Image (spheres, grey):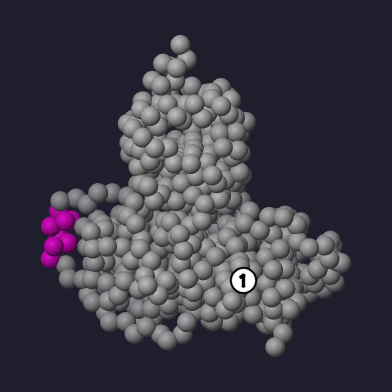
């Protein structure tokens, strides 16, 4: 089996995005921590579990972005993946999911993966587009929000279980090659073992220059702070004062 | 040039679901701006269906469309798009919508904007609004490359579409073969949680509680209210700290208690969708920019580990 896991690096959710002058993108300062998108980490873990069952499996990792994404690719190698590819996009500016899907589909074409895994969405943007779009561009089947995954014995198909609305599930078989967009909760991602950390030190992450297509698929016209749809009363003072005020407010509303 | 709008109806066992009317409301707004006509497409295996107000309905029938599959829906929607040649395709952001909508956009080599929460008119044209940057910013998109596929978050376009005479219905038999998908089985989950469903007060824990031991604080807080229950965000349930039947949000339960207290919840759209209609919302979060504060009546910028014990004492002290 030849598996590709596509990962995205995301900023700490507690960091503050600052809108740029052109008002069409936002940047985080230099001090912000970045890590692997949580959903993608589940996808990496799922690939590793396949490899444990089918030893002749090779797991590649790919990520698009500036130099910083290498730390997340390396983390996947430390978890046990075999090789990392960095599609270099040396900018913190917007790159739409459609463009990303084109770049990754292009990357996949010569490499003949049996299975491609992505997270169901990214934590920061939650658009959930890149995975299904890669599959559509490659002409292979895909399923989003996958909660169970199993390679069938003859290795020509995949059984997956998708999460539907209200907790219902649907299972199906997809012909390989296929793409599964993994939902969180499918597994518990492992911590890298010392031996894998040492092994990963000697692995070289291959850099690939990408040429960004000119087409504008989705155009961000403006950004703004999320507008408040409620009163938004901010309690001020010491912890004690805030607690007293909250108690009073809830009491006035007869909620206590 | 006259543009055309296509919506894809959500159906279950051949019945058009209510969320379809939200898609029509969205289409109404866009149609008013572009003088476009709207066609609704219904993939299924349906002999008889009620007409929709203000939109012609194209039923695409095939035995393989009896139940949802990504492959079947993609083929049916591409077939319809070939006939209708839409500039915009509107799809609900449901478990089926987000499965096939991006694929349709890629196949048509068009633009795609998912989980749209609103549309508005700017002097430069229509803007599609979605939430991004961990819910901290609103992103306003202009249309981009045609055709544009958008998925609309359920609940975002509530309110009835303008009254309009019923449109025509056309039935089309299509030969849609499933070549990549087989062995389809549906499982109904028992996710009942009677306590949470009827609670007047819901105390909800998010990733910000930090460790499972802190659930005890959430429980103690809940114990101070009558008819209360505890709930969690997706991460809390994924971590196994609470059962999935206690999950509030798009992939979990929708609750509307008198009081919802969000403890350490950042406030992604996924979570907001499940609790935004609560009567009063209180949020406790140490991040002053957390998106949850934009959806709260009372905002407490505090570390919950510090704040909740003080709140619990406060109540005891005052009650004497």
Horizontal side of residue A44 vs B276, given as left or right? left
The residue at the far top in this view is B320
**Rendered residue at 38%/29% (across/down):** A241
Q: Nearer the viewer, residue B165 or A197?
A: B165
The residue at the far right in this view is B165
Residue A181 vs A163, above or below: the answer is below
Horizontal side of residue B119 vs A119, given as left or right? right
Residue B109 shows in this picture = yes
Q: Any magenta on residue A197?
A: yes
SS for tag 1?
strand
Q: Which residues are magenta?
A: A195-202
**Rendered residue at 34%/85% (across/down):** A211
The picture places residue A213, in percent across and down from the top left corner, at 41, 85
The picture places residue B156, in percent across and down from the top left corner, at 62, 57
Quadrant in the picture for residue B160? bottom right
Circle 1 sits on which residue?
B121
The picture places residue A135, in percent across and down from the top left corner, at 47, 72
**Rendered residue at 33%/37% (across/down):** B303
Q: Any magenta on residue A17?
A: no
Residue B157 vs A132, above or below: the answer is above
The picture places residue A13, in percent across and down from the top left corner, at 35, 53
Q: Nearer the viewer, residue A245 or A64?
A: A245
The residue at the far front in this view is A237
The secondary structure that dominates the magenta segment is helix
Q: Nearer the viewer, residue B285 or A162?
A: B285
Q: Nearer the viewer, residue B45 or B244?
A: B244
């Amino acid at each position: 089996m030849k598996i590709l896991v596509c990962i995205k690096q995301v900023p700490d959710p507690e960091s503050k995005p600052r809108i740029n002058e052109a008002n069409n993108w936002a940047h985080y300062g230099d001090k912000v921590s970045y890590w692997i998108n949580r959903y993608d980490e589940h996808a990496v873990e799922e690939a590793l579990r396949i490899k444990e069952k089918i030893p002749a499996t090779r797991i590649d990792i790919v990520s698009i972005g500036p130099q910083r994404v290498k730390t997340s690719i390396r983390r996947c190698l430390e978890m046990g993946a075999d090789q990392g590819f960095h599609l270099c996009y040396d900018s913190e500016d917007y790159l739409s999911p459609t463009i990303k899907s084109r770049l990754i589909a292009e990357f996949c074409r010569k490499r003949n993966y049996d299975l491609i895994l992505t997270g169901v969405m990214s934590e920061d943007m939650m658009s959930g587009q890149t995975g299904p779009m890669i599959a559509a561009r490659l002409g292979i089947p895909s399923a989003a929000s996958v909660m169970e995954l199993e390679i069938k014995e003859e290795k020509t198909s995949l059984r997956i279980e998708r999460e539907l609305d209200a907790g219902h599930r649907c299972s199906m078989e997809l012909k390989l090659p296929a793409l599964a967009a993994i939902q969180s909760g499918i597994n518990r991602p492992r911590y890298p073992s010392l031996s894998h950390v040492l092994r990963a030190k000697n692995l070289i992450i291959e850099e690939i220059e990408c040429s960004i297509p000119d087409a504008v698929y989705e155009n961000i016209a403006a950004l703004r702070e999320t507008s408040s749809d409620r009163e938004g009363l901010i309690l001020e003072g010491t912890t004690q004062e805030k607690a007293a005020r909250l108690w009073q407010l809830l009491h006035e509303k007869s909620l206590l | 040039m006259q543009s055309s709008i296509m919506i894809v109806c959500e159906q279950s066992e051949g019945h058009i679901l209510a969320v379809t009317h939200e898609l029509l409301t969205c289409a109404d707004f866009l149609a008013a701006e572009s003088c476009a006509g709207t066609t609704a497409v219904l993939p299924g295996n349906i002999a008889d269906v009620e007409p929709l107000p203000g939109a012609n309905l194209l039923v695409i029938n095939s035995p393989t469309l009896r139940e949802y599959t990504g492959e079947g829906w993609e083929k049916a929607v591409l077939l319809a798009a070939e006939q209708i040649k839409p500039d915009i395709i509107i799809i609900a952001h449901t478990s089926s919508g987000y499965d096939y909508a991006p694929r349709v956009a890629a196949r048509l080599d068009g633009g795609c904007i998912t989980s749209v929460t609103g549309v508005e008119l700017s002097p430069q044209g229509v803007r599609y609004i979605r939430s991004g940057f961990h819910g901290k910013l609103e992103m306003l998109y202009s249309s981009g490359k045609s055709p544009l596929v958008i998925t609309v978050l359920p609940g975002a376009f509530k309110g009835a579409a303008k009254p309009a005479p019923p449109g025509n219905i056309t039935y089309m038999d299509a030969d849609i073969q499933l070549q990549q998908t087989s062995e389809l089985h549906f499982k109904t989950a028992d996710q009942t949680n009677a306590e949470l469903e009827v609670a007047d007060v819901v105390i909800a824990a998010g990733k910000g509680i930090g460790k499972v031991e802190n659930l005890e604080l959430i429980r103690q807080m809940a114990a101070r209210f009558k008819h209360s229950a505890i709930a969690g965000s997706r991460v809390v349930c994924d971590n196994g700290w609470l059962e999935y039947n206690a999950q509030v949000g798009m992939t979990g339960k929708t609750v509307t208690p008198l009081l919802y207290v969000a403890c350490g919840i950042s406030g992604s759209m996924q979570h907001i969708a499940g609790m935004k209609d609560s009567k009063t919302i209180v949020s406790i979060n140490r991040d002053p920019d957390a998106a949850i504060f934009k959806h709260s009546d009372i905002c407490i910028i505090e570390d919950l580990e510090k704040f909740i014990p003080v709140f619990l004492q406060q109540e005891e002290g005052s009650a004497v």
